[in-house]
Image (tube, rainbow, N blue to C red):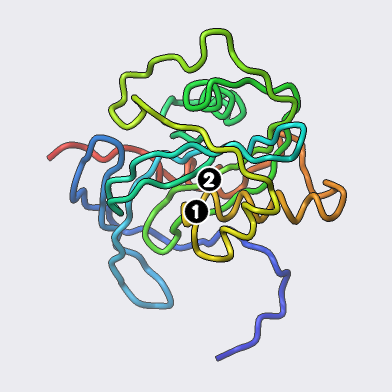
Amino acid sequence: MSEWAGPVADADADVAILASTPRFRGGIWDVRSDELDFADQRVVRDLVVHPGAVGVVALDEDDRVLLVRQYRHPVGRYLLEPPAGLLDKPGEDPLLAAQRELAEEAGFAADEWHLLVDFANSPGGSSECFRCFLARGLRRLDGGRPATGEAEEVDLPRAWVSLDEARDLVLAGQLQNPTTVVGVLAAWSSRVTGWDTLRPTDSPWPIRERVVTTGRTRRVDRT
């Protein structure tokens, strides 16, 4: 095993995709198999083609985190998580998508927005890139949450948890949604440093640009 002497930062890889084979087309994401030329070997890797997503760590004036309780079928549990949703509208601005999700899932708008953290949700098998925003200066929307028609969103009870308690619950394993884990720990860490790690909402998102331009978010053809 060699030692890496370059920059400590993620970077694009020049790996040739020799062929792609559609395996499954679902309602939201698809699966395909890519044949690669990697390290002088021809290998096949399966890929969940995901449109990407955004989430919102929303804090009130007392630094309480807004979480919603939502059923997540793959794990068969109700999870407490920040408002979040897919980037499934072509070309949609991530900030606008996050503002939409805060309104739809929680019935709130916010006056102050920053980029909190970016992450790849499961890069060993999925192209999902996730951008998490911090929202402050919260305002309740007149009329509350708009109806979306989604079964899981018929009732989304809100929970307000102090940022310190949310951090403790994450580290105790009581909150396990990835957006909750990453977002809460990022917000708590940023507050410790006086919020100096926050970035502008339109900051570059190179990993997202990479998966989009290389077709890793494009729906597979039906077979």
Mark closer to the chain start, 2 or 1 = 2
Residue 150 x %, y %: 31, 25
Would you say the residues marked 2 and 1 are in contact, meaning their CB atoms lie under 8 Å apart? yes
Could you tell me which quadrant the C terminus lies in? top left
Identify the image quadrant of residue 199: top right
| Element at label 2 | strand
Identify the image quadrant of residue 154: top left
In three-dimensional space, the C-alpha distance between marks 2 and 1, rounded to whole angstroms, equals 10 Å
- For residue 143, the mark is none
Residue 45 x %, y %: 31, 64
- For residue 178, the mark is 1
Residues 110 and 216: in front is: 110
* Image point (54%, 49%), residue name: 180
Above or below, 75 relative to 138:
below
* Image point (53%, 48%), residue name: 179
| Element at label 1 | helix
Front disc: 2 or 1: 1
Q: Left or right: 169 with respect to 42?
A: right
* Amino acid type, callout 2: Phe
* Image point (37%, 27%), residue name: 155
Residue 206 x %, y %: 62, 47
Count the labels in the image. Answer: 2
Within 10 Å of disc 2 (Cα), the crowding (few <14, some 14-19, many 20+) is: many
Residues 112 and 7: in front is: 112
- For residue 130, the mark is 2
Q: Left or right: 168 with respect to 87?
A: right
